[in-house]
Amino acid sequence: MKKTTVSLALFGALLAFGSQLAQAAAPDWSKVPKRTVQVFHAGVTPVEWVMKKSDHSGRTGINKGESCVGCHEEKGGLNFDMKRLASKELEPKGAPKTMSFPVTIQSAYDKENAYVRVSFKAPAGAFDPADKENEVKVAVMFANAEVPKGDQVGCWATCHGDARTMPEGDDKKTKYTRTGAYELMQWKSAAGAKAVDGSVSDSRKMEGGTANVQVEGGKSGDTYTVTFTRKLSGALAEGKAVPFGVAVHADHATGRFHHVSMGYTMGFGVDADVKSAKQ
């Protein structure tokens, strides 16, 4: 009995020590480079719209291997026709008052974990403030190598015209991919909300992921800061540049009434749009 008690006590001490080591390994964010991107309300522009020449002339560039961000990001901003995006043509229900806003992204990694920090000022004026529990939600998705054009179109490979909340969508269909998968992590602002460690493949799953996602988030003044910690595993590995995208539901928005980033890459030991700092 005494040996068991001592062993359990030792085990508990080792767990506590390991937890302290994990906390000590967290990045000094003041030393991690920042990359600011624009997130925007995309209306009803699913991947089918993106790849239809009569709707989107940029399809030709994508078929040549060009990326969406390579065409549309200029001097830190986006060259979209925001009036068209907000019009009844591309947003038949109604657009948010703020069509785009900046989000700052930082990334770091060590042998075990990847750390991603997202900060922004969330605008008011959502068209559909239906999420009464969460004023804000923040999601980051990473594409694996099997997603076609994942490094070009970002999260658009999960956005389809037949999914729910689309004008001709099926209420039973969530985001999905035709090939490959995305690893999904999300923070919700509601008190006591758990970190989402999920995926998107044949459907979106808000649990069951294997990245051991942990998240801390909050608001200081008018700025939200959300810090994700997850395993350096799956789609993420040293020596790889991984396609990713960010989505922000602001002002209690729900469904497709979010603001999303273009598709970027995050590099772990290699050059990318966002280069993760090795710890």
Image (cartoon, rainbow, N blue to C red):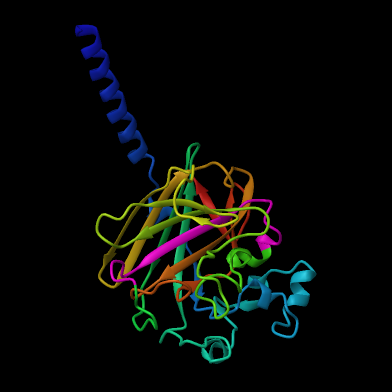
Residue 254 x %, y %: 40, 72
Q: Is residue 105 left or right of residue 203?
A: left
Q: How many marks?
A: 0
Q: Residue at x 45, y 61 (%)?
A: 139
Looking at the image, residue 230 lies above or below residue 226: above
Residue 119 picture quarter: bottom left
Percent coordinates x, y for residue 154 in the rendering: 61, 64
- Image position of 81 (left or right of 59): left
Please check the rendered image and state whether residue 51 is part of the magenta-colored stretch, yes or no.
no
**Which image quadrant for residue 97?**
bottom left
Q: Report which quarter residue 265 is drawn in.
A: bottom right
Between 27 and 247, the one nearer to me in the picture? 247
Range of residues picked out in magenta: 131-151
Which residue corresponds to the image point at 38% horizontal and 74% vertical from the top-left? 253
Q: In percent of the image, x 19 and y 7: which residue is there?
A: 2
Decide whether residue 140 is among the magenta residues: yes
